[in-house]
Amino acid sequence: MSTEIDVLVLGGAGVDTIVHVPELPVPFADSHMIRPGIVTRAGQSGDFVALGTSALGLRTHHLDLLGDDPEGDLVRALHREHGIGLTAVPQPLGTKRAVNLVGPDGRRLSLYDATRVADTDRLPEATVRALAAASRHAHVVITQPCAHALPALREAGLTISTDLHDWDGSNPYHEPFAHQADLVFLSSTALTDPERTMRRITERGRARIVVATAGADGAYLLADGELTHVPAAAPPAPVVDSNGAGDAFAAAFLHAWLNGAPPHRSALHGTVAGAYACTIPSSRAAGIGREELSAGVTELERSGQPGDPGTSSVPPATRPCGG
């Protein structure tokens, strides 16, 4: 089937205000002097995945609810600047926004504005179906109302990926995404037994590939029942911010996987892109390019760390970057 879109990204469009803090948790005080300053810029999870896949040459289109407000204008401008197709469904409640508190070591705490979403929010089914008919793959962000679009995507015959982020393995909100996707990303940070959660996803859902990122410990890949470790890539510059590392991992994995790479090599692409993202200040929105990604994967393969079969359980992440 001929398609016009390689990756259709659903959800996750919004604006972040970045606040650098002296440490996390923030020490109680009447005030803090903030450097390098406070910056508001477009870019939440869906925006970053779309930016990453587009920078790597995949034809990308983004669908989400956006408000007629300054935040929505920032999101529209980001997509125009990077040549990413955008279908913006009017959102009377306004564009999603968040405040990210970023510590000196690059860790972050995100505060999301819950007034800009409603349980009744929906992406128009006709719009979802029309875009799905022109697409090869869909990446579904776990923002409201993307779960309701999953049946239409399945009926269109697309492969589907999702990122559960810091799911604890039990919150029922994440289950429709976990069980309807063919490819599932998640962080191991909040999981007491990551391998058990990964295997449960494959047992209860459609996924044949599950990737648990583990910060500077790399990532763990469960593909066709076999668990392997994926080594972390060394960041090419000092780590300044972990914001967007998981989205970069997913985008680079999709780039390789949709171009025919096996799961483990796709995950190597992910770890290189995730490490790169940790070197980009949170005030910027930039994805790794194909040449730099390819060079990083080649270097990682030369290091002689092919990944070990899953003979041990997956440890939770303890550091922010590396995948």
Image (cartoon, rainbow, N blue to C red):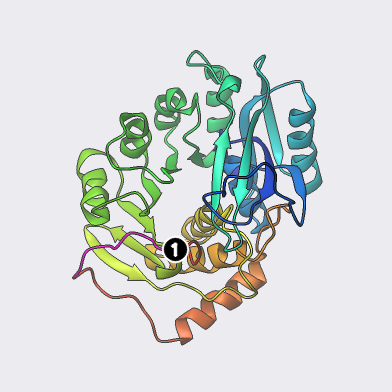
Rendered location of residue 246, percent (x, y): 51, 54
Residue at 29 percent across and 58 percent down: it is 223
Q: Position of residue 196 (x, y in %)?
A: 20, 52
Is 15 placed left or right of 257 in the picture?
right
> Is residue 68 depicted above or below 165 in this figure?
above
In the rendered view, would you say 275 is above or below 58? Answer: below
Residue wearing tag 1: 215
Residue 139 percent location from the top left of the image: 50, 41
**Residue 106 part of the magenta-drawn span:** no
Q: Report the residue at 66% width, 58% height from top.
A: 287
- Amino acid type assigned to the residue bearing label 1 in the image: Gly
Give the magenta-colored segment's residue range.
312-318
Residue 15: x percent and y percent? 68, 37
Q: Residue at x 51, y 58 (%)?
A: 249
Reply above or below: 102 against 320: above
Q: Is residue 316 magenta?
A: yes
Q: Residue at x 77, y 51 (%)?
A: 37
Which secondary structure lies at badge 1? helix
Q: Is residue 62 visible?
A: yes
Mark 1 closeness class: few <14, some 14–19, many ≥20 residues within 10 Å: many
Q: Furthest-front residue in view?
A: 30
Front residue of 270/92: it is: 92
- Left or right position of 26 against 94: left
Q: Magenta segment, principal secondary structure?
A: loop
* Horizontal relation, residue 166 to residue 3: left or right: left
The answer to which quarter of the image holds residue 172 is: top left
Residue placed most toward the observer, 170 or 247: 170
> Looking at the image, can residue 4 be seen?
no
Q: How many marks?
A: 1
Between 168 and 185, the residue placed more toward the observer is: 168
